[in-house]
Amino acid sequence: MDRRSFLLGTSTLALSQLLFGCGENNQKQLKVQLLKGSIPGQVVNQFHKGLQQQVQLKFAPVEQIQDLFQQLQNWQEKPKATDEQEWKRFIPFMQGQKIADVDLVTLGDYWLKAAIEQKLIQPLQELQGNQLKQWPALDQRWKQLVTRNDQGNLDTQGKVWGAPYRWGSTVIVYNRDKLQKLGWTPKDWSDLWRDGVQQQISLLNQPREVIGLVLKKLGKSYNTENLDQVPGLEKELQRLNQQVKFYSSNNYLEPLIMGDTWLAVGWSSDVLPVLGRYPQLGAIIPQSGTAIWADLWVRPAGISTKSSLSDQWIDFCWQPSIAKQISVLTKSNSPISTNIVASDIQEPLWSLLESDVYDGLRLRQVFDKSEFLLPLPPSAIKQYESLFAKIKV
């Protein structure tokens, strides 16, 4: 999934400064490649101060999730034999080098199946033995999300492949000034079909997201496998397409801010950071439920599992006070609380949930109605892609 991440001001700067700290060659290290903006610099500083040993932390931010997935693939590619590689095998210190020299990587849950199937990552074995103190505090849905078989499919008897540390959702963001003239604000997906907003909407350029929201409007699941058995689906998609000005997974906020579009469907990680800067923008989580995404810590294949530093970092991120900081400072939500309350949620998001738009609906109920985009069979994926291409023509 192509989710952008906005810079986080001083928190991001603090993290960047930590990356270039000097350390002794014999000093223990924790090397992490993470999605830019998904961990505040002050959280890394707190972790460093709390360690009982001298450790060098190397946290390297990367712009987009798909870049991190590509890096995992690059690490596992087998290079073609060259003359240089041939002579290197005779040099003792050049032998047995690791393919990847990073302990943990951020990966979106959407990419987890492919990473497992392609053997790009290895299980987090310690979670299966509940050695991480905060693992039991995770809601069962999070445990189910990352427990999979060797094909990357959900399996309660499988292995644990990732550790979620923050989550968000797909939302509707809108220009208050434009919709005020129409006398309404959006509450649910069905509002995208309203009169008066034709050619004023932008949607994510993602088959699962767009077809999924239509399925949700029709009372179906985002993870419906056989689209042919959903009456009226194609007709509803065609009607929605008539409302759409353009499809984009990256550049949907700028036109909305400028007033070139009136509504957009986007990811909360993009939307929430800009709400405070642009008061003309409002956002809602559709009350019938939406798609949920999660950022996970995963361990690249080929990396030694003997070091406890990566385990300590995962557990640190799950400590309630730290989880709350990650949530507040990255404008996301935490997977660690099973009873979600106002203090755990971003103020802009919670104020939306408390408004009349929701008629008292609480985030817990929205969460229960929402879904992760789970792996689908190849035949189903082709259906989604084919139908999406067809309606956009």
Image (cartoon, helix red, strand yellow):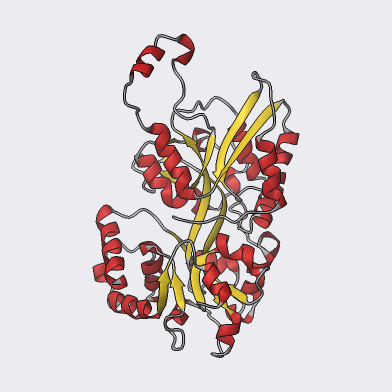
Please state the horizontal and vertical placement of residue 169, each as a whole percent of the image: 52, 62
Task: Tell me the quarter of the picture where residue 357 sits.
Answer: bottom right
Q: Quadrant of the N terminus?
A: bottom left
Where is 32 relative to 67, above or below?
A: above
Q: Is residue 205 left or right of residue 262?
A: left
Q: Is residue 116 left or right of residue 284?
A: left
Marker count (numbered) = 0
Please state the horizontal and vertical placement of residue 212, each as a whole percent of the image: 39, 67
**Residue at 39% in and 40% down:** 116
**Residue at 30% in and 75% down:** 233
Q: Nearer the viewer, residue 152 or 330?
A: 330
Please state the horizontal and vertical placement of residue 333, each as a whole percent of the image: 61, 57
Where is 31 relative to 84, above or below?
A: below
Where is 371 relative to 155, above or below?
A: below
| Direction right: furthest residue | 49
Please state the horizontal and vertical placement of residue 34, each as a whole percent of the image: 56, 43
Q: Nearer the viewer, residue 132 or 1?
A: 1
Q: Is residue 45 left or right of residue 292?
A: right
Asked if one can make out residue 155 in the rendered structure from this viewpoint, the answer is no
Q: Nearer the viewer, residue 214 or 250?
A: 250
Asked if one can make out residue 139 in the rendered structure from this viewpoint, the answer is yes
Q: Quadrant of the C terminus?
A: bottom left
**Residue at 49% in and 12% down:** 93
